[in-house]
Image: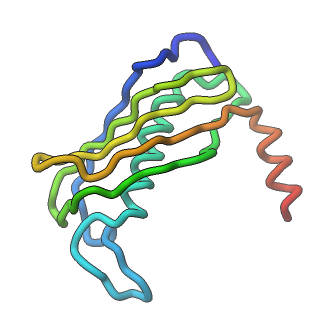
Amino acid sequence: MKPGLNVGHRETMSIVVASDMCPAFGGVQVHPTLSTVSMIYYMEWVGRRVILPFLEEGEEGVGAAISVEHRAPAPVGKEVTFTAEAVEVTPRRVVCRVWAEHDKGIVGEGMFHQAILPRQKILDRIASMK
């Protein structure tokens, strides 16, 4: 990784909850609120934004672990802001505290771990699983 990524570095992004972000199983929507799956997707995305400017040529980040709690609903039409804050940074690992919030409170929070690896090593590992 390039130098400069330090503990405390933050990235944010905001979304407006849409109906395709709601929990649905077999094409049947459960309720009109941000699903846990969608919340985790955006938590990973904002965590990725933390590492992107610091990746070297030929280097890539992969999600290694995520542990989150979904604390409150975010109804369709609600703006939700996702934040990732680096809490551990090494040349091969970045851990971020992640959270989602709207004007009424915390929607979810947790930890997201990313491994930093040579891109070719990732591709070789994927190929070995075919």
Extreme residue in the right direction? 128
Extreme residue in the top direction? 3
Question: Where is the N terminus found, in terms of image quarters?
Answer: top right
Residue drawn at point x = 79 percent, y = 47 percent: 123
In-front residue for pair 58/96: 96
Question: Where is the C terminus found, in terms of image quarters?
Answer: bottom right
Extreme residue in the left direction? 104
Residue 31 placed where, x, y %? 24, 78
- Quick check: 101 left or right of 95? left
In which quarter of the view is residue 30 placed?
Answer: bottom left
Residue 38 placed where, x, y %? 39, 61
Vertical arrangement, residue 3 with respect to residue 100, above or below = above
Residue 51 placed where, x, y %? 53, 29
In-front residue for pair 91/19: 91
Residue drawn at point x = 73 percent, y = 29 percent: 58
- Quick check: 123 left or right of 33? right
Residue drawn at point x = 46 percent, y = 38 percent: 47
Residue 7 placed where, x, y %? 46, 18
In which quarter of the view is residue 37 placed?
Answer: bottom left
Its colouring scheme is rainbow
Q: How many marks?
A: 0
Residue drawn at point x = 32 percent, y = 35 percent: 12
